[in-house]
Amino acid sequence: PLADPAFQSETRAFPGIGRRPLAPCHVRFAWSGRDLLFSWKRRDRAPAATRLNLAETPLSDPLLFDLEILSGATVIRTASSLSQTGFAYTAAMQAADFPRGLPNPLTTRLCQRSSVLGRGCPKTESLYVR
């Protein structure tokens, strides 16, 4: 019974991890002249997103991504609030970030953003660009 002294209650707040955006997947790159083009696929937690016969995953949140280009553990360049599933890393950006040439592998970290919870799970990818 509730009146029993052994009965205890506790109020808990959970961090909402189940609503946090999933990490993007299928991170790829392609060269266009001297520019490096990144592309990826977005993921969604909406139940409709689990259907395999859809050409495009339905959106449950606005489409926003943050891409970080790393040198070791140091973030060299951040592209925030990207509204497309791609980014052009131009030759000028590369020269400014890596004067001696791109490292091989080039490490990137990509997050999908939620308007409510902020950055989701990161996807770290080492891309062999040479």
Image: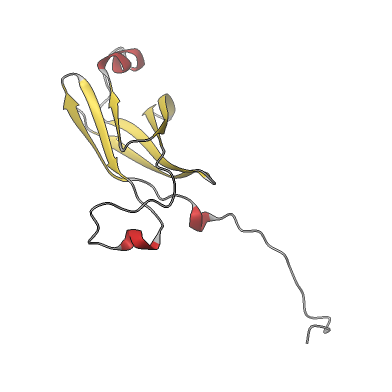
Q: Quadrant of the C terminus?
A: top left
Q: Position of residue 4 (x, y in %)?
A: 82, 84
Q: Quadrant of the N terminus?
A: bottom right
Q: Position of residue 19 (x, y in %)?
A: 50, 55
Residue at image position (35%, 61%) is 48
Q: Position of residue 127 (x, y in %)?
A: 25, 34
Residue 6 can be seen in this image = yes
Q: Position of residue 109 (x, y in %)?
A: 38, 36
- Give the residue furthest to the bottom: 1
Measured along the vertical axis of the image, is residue 112 above or below residue 72? below
Residue at image position (27%, 19%) is 90
Say whether residue 34 is left or right of residue 66. Answer: left
Say whether residue 110 is left or right of residue 119. Answer: left
Residue at image position (34%, 53%) is 58
Of 65 and 103, which appears nearest the observer? Answer: 65
Of 99 and 86, which appears nearest the observer? Answer: 86
Quadrant housing residue 5: bottom right
